[in-house]
Amino acid sequence: MFKIGFIGLGVMGRPMAQHLLNKYQELYIYTRTKKKAEELIQNGAIWCDTISELAQQCNLIFTIVGMPSDVQDVYLGKTGLINSCKPETILIDMTTSSPSLAKEIYQKALSKNIYVLDAPVSGGDIGAKNQTLSIMVGGDEKVFEKVQE
């Protein structure tokens, strides 16, 4: 069973996180600006003060942050996901980023027995609110099969 985390609660992330909370009843969240998380916290999401705190609680973590530089910080930073997650954790990055960064994250994660799917989305904030996003997933097929629900 997955303990799910979500990082990035902006225009796209907030409704996506709310849908996960509605479906699974438990969701750990982190975003740089806690104010953006207040509604989710009131709805029952569990706030984490740091990325590493969230990483220690969860074994399936979604991210959707603003820019490739943010992806790099969240994943490869000193206290980022790659350095904080437990082995066997699955990370799904839904940010539109660069293929070279996605490959770098994938390789560094794999060296620590952490699995990454690159899954950028199309459909904008309306798609996020209406659950109609198109998701293009790249990564290991067996990892993808584990998270298809």
Image (cartoon, rainbow, N blue to C red):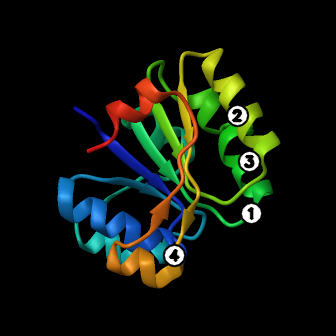
**Residue 59 visible to the viewer:** no
Q: Position of residue 110 (x, y in %)?
A: 61, 19
Residue at figure coordinates x 42%, y 35% from the top left: 144
Label 2 and label 1: CA atoms lie apart by 15 Å
Q: Amino acid at mark 1?
A: Met
State the separation of the CA atoms marked 4 and 3: 25 Å
Q: Are marks 3 and 2 in contact (CB under 8 Å)?
A: no
Left or right of residue 102: residue 7:
left
Q: Which residue is mark 1?
A: 67
Which residue is labeled 2 in the image? 105
Amino acid residing under circle 2: Ile
**Which is in the foreground here, disc 2 or disc 4?**
4
Q: CA gap, disc 2 to disc 4? A: 25 Å
Q: Secondary structure at mark 2?
A: helix
Comparing marks 4 and 3, which lies closer to the viewer? 4
Q: Residue 81: x percent and y percent?
A: 59, 37
Q: Upstream in the sequence, badge 2 or badge 4?
A: 2
* Residue to which mark 3 is pinned: 73
Q: Are marks 3 and 1 in contact (CB under 8 Å)?
A: no
Q: Earlier in the sequence, mark 3 or mark 1?
A: 1
Q: Quadrant of the N terminus?
A: top left
**In the current view of this chain or complex, which residue is farthest to the bottom?**
126
